[in-house]
Amino acid sequence: MATQDTATDGVSFAEPEEWRLVRSSLDEFVEREVRPLEDDLGESWSNPRVRHDADGRYVDEALEAIETVRRKSAAAGFYAMNLPQEYGGEDVSNVTWYRAKRHVASHGTGLASHVLAGPEGPKPLLANAEGDQVEEYLKPVVRAEKSTGFAQTEPGAGSDSPNMQTRAERASGHADGDEWVLNGTKQWITNAPYADFLQVFARTTPQEEAGRYGGITCFLVEDDEYDVGTLNNAVGSVGLQAEVHLDDVRVGEDRVLGEVDDAFYEAMGFLSLGRLELGAEAVGHANHLLELGTEYANDREAFGRPIGTFQGISHKLARGRANVDAADALGLRLAWQMDGGEDAIQEASSFKWFATNAYWQVADDVVQVHGGNGLSEENPFMDHLHLARLLRIVEGADEIQLNTVAKQMGVQ
Ligand SMILES: Cc1cc2nc3c(=O)[nH]c(=O)nc-3n(C[C@H](O)[C@H](O)[C@H](O)COP(=O)(O)OP(=O)(O)OC[C@H]3O[C@@H](n4cnc5c(N)ncnc54)[C@H](O)[C@@H]3O)c2cc1C
């Protein structure tokens, strides 16, 4: 007879020993390296008003703490463990990466959320680095010695990003003819204020010639070559995003990442991974909130009894449990499909949409369970509500995910 640890009819949700070891070392790392830093920082970490300067930028001590967490995590082999070993990663499967992302998120929105690489870290697109780019850009980012960002969105092009207006033209008149000149404005670029370099998307061949998704190239642009404009302070992510101005930025051919004119197709090849990661974070955060909500519902009394005995409260938590479990099952299946070499476009959109909406509903319900305390700045619940709302827009908004699902289903 099949045991719980073996696949029955090809289906298994068993957690292998390898993952259990990763999980317990991640927990040890958070307790040993991350919590003491948070304690030392005190209010400059926990209070958003103190964590940012008057412009909204992170204060130096908060930035240093984030960098310390990333570097120590990289040294311990966690930070970019999904990347190939040849670049300094650990080559773990998508299933393990999904579980790790989910698990770290269950530690809350504090410094622990910087243990695993996010938008500032190495993405598979950067693994297109060749020649000197590997030592100059890719490996330092894997070691968390440098940070980067992905600059695609513009004031006039978000969901419709192939419509970008940023241009890169081959320098005319240059002796070697091997320079590109970039002009344009990006916005909402995560980590732009602090990055060492950005991966900037620019149109290199007009749409009429190259088609909608062709004709776009990715360039590695250093921080002293672009100007950081106004911070785009999103509620839930203050201090992290900014406008980027590219004003006659001249870069050599050696700064082209991947193939000229092919960047959009190359990036589309990694869409499912981005959606897997965001959904994993949503599931992890929601799990954390459900734990906090359950504890509070059992402790807090009203009308002489624990509020958890009122169905108006218990059903909120039960509905959250059911939705988050369903999201988790979608996430695990998606990661497993990706490990099998599938693009899983429809499943990635279904998962990202479902998981972030489940998180949003849980965050709202858990604020309600906590009553006035749910709204207190002392507690993390409103931070979660803001973050959950934000996750329903970034990496493809709800509507774009549903468009993708409908298209993949064959709905006209
Ligand atoms: C916190 C944060 C971090 C970000 N980080 C980055 C980053 O690092 N790099 C980067 O390049 N970008 C980044 N972005 C930008 C993000 O990717 C865009 O905001 C997102 O793609 C939506 O684009 P938009 O804001 O221009 O909205 P729009 O595209 O203008 O959309 C507005 C509304 O219309 C809907 N809509 C648009 N087209 C359709 C359609 N065809 N069918 C149905 N509905 C549609 C959208 O779903 C949305 O609800 C970030 C944004 C935020 C808020």
Image: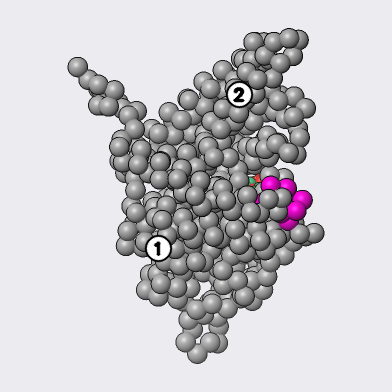
For the residue labelled by badge 1, is the local secondary structure a helix, a strand or a loop?
helix
Residue 208, placed above or below residue 224:
above
Say if residue 366 shows up in the picture: yes
The amino acid type found where label 1 is placed reads Asn
Q: Is residue 126 visible?
A: no
263 left or right of 8 in image? right
Q: Nearer the viewer, residue 164 or 343?
A: 343
Q: Position of residue 31 (x, y in %)?
A: 51, 46
Residue 25 position within the rendered picture, expressed as x and y whole percent measured from the top left: 40, 45
Task: Please say if the residues under marks 1 and 2 sit with CB atoms less than 8 Å apart.
Answer: no
> In x, y percent, where is residue 118?
52, 52
Indicate which disc residue 128 carries: 1
Residue that badge 2 annotates: 295
The front one of 169 and 346 is 346
Mark 2 belongs to which amino acid? Glu
Q: Which residues are magenta?
A: 45-52
